[in-house]
Image (cartoon, rainbow, N blue to C red):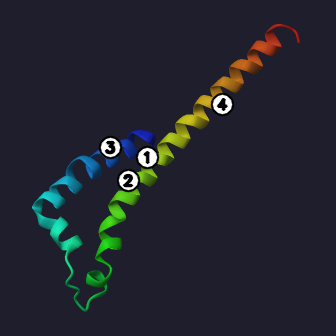
Amino acid sequence: MSPGAAGGALRRLDGGGAAAALSAGLIGVIHGEERGRSLLSRNKEGVLSLPGYWALSLLSSGMARAVRRSAGAAAAAAEHGRTSHGR
């Protein structure tokens, strides 16, 4: 996934979906005491937090790519500086 696509996915996840879901009453479901018999109902906190963790994963992947790209450019510039001065 490209950094642009990751950023777009992150904005959609964080900006729209999560806020809309929470304001639509999902916060009450997450913090409610009642548990059903289904696997989803028994693990609602974990399942409903997955989009947030996925967004953090996309963000950290994009940041790591940017750091690698920046470090590679700095190393190339330093190497160019060493070879152009005859050292």
Q: Percent x, y for residue 51?
A: 33, 61
Which residue extends farthest top? 85
Marks 4/1: CA distance?
20 Å
Find out whether the residues at labels 3 and 1 contact each other: C-beta distance under 8 Å: no
Marks 3/2: CA distance?
10 Å
The kind of secondary structure element at disc 1 is helix
Find out whether the residues at labels 4 and 2 contact each other: C-beta distance under 8 Å: no
Q: Residues within 10 Å of mark 2 (few under 14, many from 20)?
A: some
Which amino acid type is shown beneath numbered disc 1? Leu
Q: Percent x, y for residue 48?
A: 29, 68
Sooner in the amino-acid sequence: mark 4 or mark 3 = 3
User: What number is the disc on residue 50?
Assistant: none
Sooner in the amino-acid sequence: mark 3 or mark 2 = 3
Q: Percent x, y for residue 66?
A: 53, 35
Which amino acid type is shown beneath numbered disc 4? Gly
Nearest the eye: 40 or 27: 27
Compared with residue 12, is residue 71 higher up or lower down, i.e. above or below? above
User: What number is the disc on residue 8?
Assistant: 3
Would residue 29 be found to the left or right of residue 82 on screen?
A: left
Sooner in the amino-acid sequence: mark 3 or mark 1 = 3
Identify the residue at horizontal 13%, vertical 58% (top origin): 23
Select label 4 or label 2 by which is in front: 2
- For disc 4, the marked residue is 72
Identify the residue at horizontal 29%, vertical 76% (top origin): 44
The image quadrant that residue 76 belongs to is top right
- For disc 2, the marked residue is 55
Sooner in the amino-acid sequence: mark 4 or mark 2 = 2
Find out whether the residues at labels 2 and 1 contact each other: C-beta distance under 8 Å: yes
